[in-house]
Image (cartoon, rainbow, N blue to C red):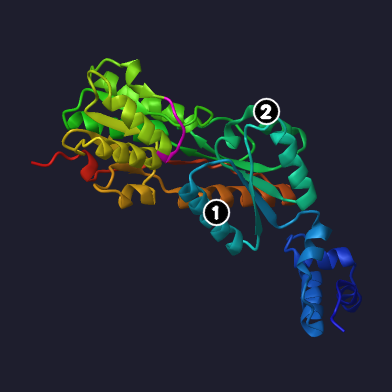
Amino acid sequence: MAATIKSVAELAGVSIKTVSRVVNKEGTVKPDTLKRVEQAIAELKYTPNKAARDLASNVTSVLGYVYDNPNAYYIIDMQKGILDVCRKNNFELLIHPCDASSENIAQELVDMVDSAQLAGLVLSPPLSEMPDVLHHLDNKNISYVRILSGDSEFSSTLPYVLVNDFKAAFQITEHLIAQGHKHIAFIAGEVIHKSTTERLNGYKAALEKASIPFDESLVIEGTYSFETGVKSADVLLSMPSRPTAVFACNDEIAAGTLFGARMKGVDVPNDLAIAGFEDSPFSRQTFPPLTTASQPTNEIAQSATSSLIQYLRAKKTKTNFNNLTQTFTPQLVVRSSTEVTL
């Protein structure tokens, strides 16, 4: 018969709670008591039951990743990054796709946390940027980490990670201007994503710096999809004074724009330069390959997950959590879609 926590406690002459503290490495056991318990564990060859240990400590070792994002490559990279950190820290991961526009989304997340006994949530946009959802989670005392578009730190007891979309978008637009373009279109993703607004603002700031007037007619609203790029190309290339360059809000839109342009016989980049954002496989699989901003999604996910686990451990041991926010800035990657060939 396998040894139990009760038999270990009896052999060591301590309480079950003391054995639990040793097993969970809580660091509140006296050295001589710790030694006795460890000797009893070794003698009885006791292997702690993970589920029982979680239950006894009232903290599960399962995190949830909640997302509503149409970009499959982004989701895959996020999952890989989160899983890597979870495995290193003996956490499991529950992945939960959802519809952020649902009127019951906040309650859906609360119910999921309760039913799966989750320790905390990793929230990516747009959920991480929805005040109503966050307020609901706060009211239920649910721990979470947010991945946000922005560059300004703010006061928060909960961890978060920032992505500086504004600066990266500024650099992309500045690159297009340096190539001689003054008539530059912008194709947006869903406005529910703050990244859309930040990238648009970066585009506007670069135009302003170069004293190029902002033309609202050159901004096309859409979704983060290939189809938006195809449709936008048709609109932009039908204009009396059509643009010479396009900054698409992500690589999928940019790839669709490239496809739409070539269907109309437009040469890229000689007649129309096209840049995307994120450096997903879309940017490398097109011809010509796309200029973009390389976003380290895997690293962003790892940083967010590590911060959440540190927060949970600090909360459990009632120690201070040092909320060291990390900011990631996607880096400009110049490829053939914006470099004019002679």
128 with respect to 40 (left or right): left
- Measuring from the top left, give residue 157's x and y in whole percent: 64, 36
Three-letter residue code for mark 2: Asp
Q: In the picture shown, does residue 101 fall above or below 324?
A: above
Q: Is residue 222 magenta?
A: yes
* Mark 1 crowd level (few <14, some 14–19, many ≥20, 10 Å Cα): some
Identify which residue is drawn at 80% across, 84% down: 43
Pointer 1 with pointer 2, Cβ within 8 A: no
Frontmost residue, 68 versus 56: 68
Residue 329 in sight: no
Give the residue at the far left of this rendering: 342
Q: In the picture shown, does residue 326 fall above or below 173?
A: below
- Measuring from the top left, give residue 99's x and y in whole percent: 63, 38
Q: Which residue is mark 1?
A: 79
The span shown in magenta is 221-226
Q: In the picture shown, does residue 19 fall above or below 189?
A: below
Q: Give the structural element (helix, strand or loop) at label 2.
A: helix
Frontmost residue, 195 versus 341: 341
Q: Which residue is mark 2?
A: 132
Quadrant holding the N terminus: bottom right
Tell me the CA gap for discs 1 and 2.
25 Å
